[in-house]
Amino acid sequence: MSYIILALLFILSGFFMKYSDDFMDELGNVRFASILGVICGIASAVASIYSVEAAYIFIAIPIGNFIAMKIDGIHHVITLIVYIVILLACGIPNLSLVILLICILGTLADEVGHELISKVTQNRFLNFFFEYRFVLKIVIFLLAVCGVFNIWIFVCFIMFELSYVFAGMVFSRLN
């Protein structure tokens, strides 16, 4: 699969992940949040089927969020079910448990830090670092530098993150 298509899937996944969350958290709109979650689940699953590196990322994110108890709405459950069903139907790529665990720990550190750091410190760097969840970005970058991931997956992940932030800004403006 071309990295352009993969980048588009990462962008769609990030955008609809955030937009779904905001529709649920801010407006309580379960139906629309779930529809957007389905789009996110489909984009994430297609990326995971075609790229083992994307599979590490898109499998680690829900597992890390589950452990951090951040899967807190029916829209998350629906998104996860869509993702899992598509992966099971099309085949889960062969994954290294060690690499997956590294990505899960990066996600978990981001989620726990995002919730706790601002409550325990006023350090602007740490607050910024965890507000924008830099642990997984660094993990993916290091995996790319070490040759485990292709550097283009890091670029795709940054595009995922930027589209996630952009979705939050669009949602705030429109609502």
Image (cartoon, grey):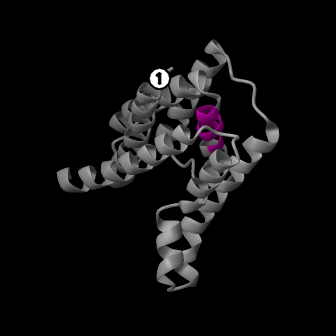
Judging depth in this view, the residue of 16 and 26 nearest the camera is 16
Residue pictured at 42% horizontal, 44% vertical: 159
Please provide percent x and percent y for residue 110.
Answer: 59, 60
The furthest residue to the left:
174
Is the residue 173 above or below the residue 8 in the image? below
Badge 1 marks a residue whose secondary structure is loop
Residue found at x 62% / y 26%? 84
User: Which residue is painted at 66% across and 37% down in the image?
Assistant: 56
The answer to whether residue 68 shows anywhere in this view is no
Residue occupying image coordinates x 62% and y 64%:
112
**Residue 23 is at least partly visible in this image:** yes
Please state which of residues 90 and 53 is positioned toward the viewer in this rendering.
53
**Percent of width and height locating residue 149:** 64, 39
Rendered position, 66 above or below 125: above
The image quadrant of residue 111 is bottom right
Look at mark 1 in the image and give the residue it sits on. 2
Q: Main secondary structure of the magenta part?
A: helix
The residues colored magenta run 53-60
Q: Residues within 10 Å of mark 1 (few under 14, many from 20)?
A: few
Task: Give percent across and percent down for residue 103.
Answer: 68, 48
